[in-house]
Every structure is written in structure tokens, then in C-alpha cells.
Amino acid sequence: MSQYQAGDLIQKRCMKCFHDEAKVMKVERREFKEKSAVILWCQCPECGMNDDELIPQDEVVDK
Ligand SMILES: [Zn+2]
């Protein structure tokens, strides 16, 4: 399972205002042919710009 959930703050540089955190609005799991990934739909808390981040699941360490 993903370690991310809606409401989390992640380290991500906003392309518009360069704020270095983004708030996760929605976590979506995607299955690709050979591996799965998690898409984080996020929003900058400063300027409100929407962005997304693709996280390959094999790089996510579940604990
Ligand atoms: Zn921003």
C-alpha cells in the first residue's frame, strides 16, 4: 500500500511560486504493464496551483 494519503505535505517545488511543499489532494494508484505507480494529485498551499507527481511503486518503501 502507498505511504501517501490525502492531506499529506510532500517535498515538491511549485513551478509557479517556487514554494517547496505541496499538499496532497488525492492519491491514485495506477497499474502499468510491468509495474504499478502512485499518482499524487497535489496543490500548492501558497498559490493554489495544481500539479501531479508520479511515484513508481518499486521506489516506495513500505514499512
Ligand atoms: Zn505555488
Image (cartoon, helix red, strand yellow):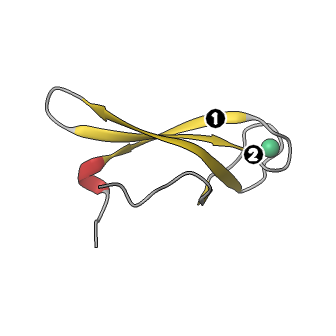
40 versus 32 height, above or below: below
CB within 8 Å, label 2 to label 1? yes
Residue at far bottom of view:
63
Mark 1, residue position: 51
Q: Residue 3 vs residue 34: left or right? A: right
- Closer to the chain start, of discs 2 and 1, is 2
SS assignment at label 1:
strand
Q: Quadrant of the N terminus?
A: bottom left
Q: Is mark 2 within 8 Å of ligand 1?
A: yes
Q: Quadrant of residue 10?
A: bottom right
Picture quarter with ligand 1: top right
Q: Amino acid at mark 1?
A: Asp
Instruction: State the image coordinates of residue 60 (x, y, percent, origin top left).
Output: 32, 58
Rendered position, 30 above or below 44? above
- Name the residue carrying label 2: 44
Q: Is residue 31 left or right of residue 15?
A: left
Q: Amino acid at mark 2?
A: Cys
Q: Nearer the viewer, residue 13 or 39?
A: 39
